[in-house]
Structures are given as structure tokens and as C-alpha cells.
Image (tube, grey):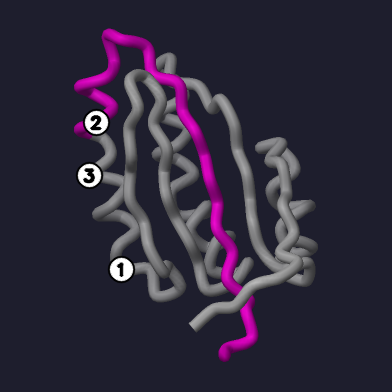
Amino acid sequence: MLPDTAVSIHPYFRIPNELLDETRAVCQKFVDQTKEEPGCLYYAFTFADNLMHCREGYEDANALLTHLTRVGPMIEELLSTGVTIERLEVHGPAAEIEKLREPMAGLAPRFFTLETGFRR
């Protein structure tokens, strides 16, 4: 088994009814921006009514921070339309979480620390 340095981020966005179609269209721009990032393990959007979740995982904290730098302006633009972040979680091993606490503090995520499991 590999030593696990992977981190995942789980943003949940609340979308006003009148922005659902527009927001769905913007998702492809995020995917196109992210798909060439070497440290990205997976990246996708899921929906439940007016709630959108970005399902994303990275090799380590540095790869996640690189991603946030790249998509930061796009996120700001999305939030300026009336879309809001309902919840933000970050999951990963303690050493990787510590690297994220300060740079992500402004987003007020809830950090979850890996305690047991495996990664192939």
C-alpha cells in the first residue's frame, strides 16, 4: 500500500433557481481548467436540486493549493452571481491538513483528519 498523502475538498454550493442552467454551464469551464493539473486525482460536479457539490481529490496539499490558485478567480466570479458556499470540508492525513489550515483559513473550511484506512 502507498503512504497516503491524498486530500479531498468538498465544497457544497447553494444555487438560486434562476441561476441553475447558467451555473451548470460554468461547471465545464472549471473542468477544462482543472483536467490538466498533474496533482488532480479526480474532479466532477454533482447536483441535488439547488445544491451543487464539486467532487475533487488531489495527490497532496500542495496540489490542492495549486488548484485553488488556478480556479480562485473563477470561484470569485461564480460567487458574485448569487451562488453561495453552503459548506466546505477538507479531508486528509494530519500532516497534509496542517499545510492547508493557514492558506485556507479565509474560506472557513471544516477539516477532517484521516485516522484509519488504506489507499491503493
**Secondary structure under badge 1?**
loop
Would you say 9 lies left or right of 16 here?
right
Image location of residue 108, percent across then percent down: 71, 36
**Secondary structure under badge 2?**
helix
Residue shown at 42% from the left, 38% from the top:
53
Residue shown at 57% from the left, 90% from the top:
1
Q: Which residue is mark 1?
A: 36
Image quarter of residue 95: bottom right
**Seen from this angle, which residue lies furthest front?**
117
Amino acid carrying mark 2 in the image: Arg
Kindly identify which numbered label has been placed on residue 28.
3
Q: Earlier in the sequence, mark 3 or mark 1?
A: 3
Kindly identify which numbered label has been placed on residue 24.
2
Q: Earlier in the sequence, mark 1 or mark 2?
A: 2
The residue carrying pointer 3 sits among few (fewer than 14), some (14 to 19) or many (20 or more) residues within 10 Å by Cα, namely few
Give the magenta range.
Answer: 1-25
Amino acid carrying mark 1 in the image: Glu
Residue shown at 71% from the left, 42% from the top:
110
Kindly identify which numbered label has been placed on residue 11.
none
Q: Are marks 3 and 1 in contact (CB under 8 Å)?
A: no
**Secondary structure under badge 3?**
helix
Image quarter of residue 36: bottom left
3D distance between C-alphas at marks 1 and 2 = 21 Å
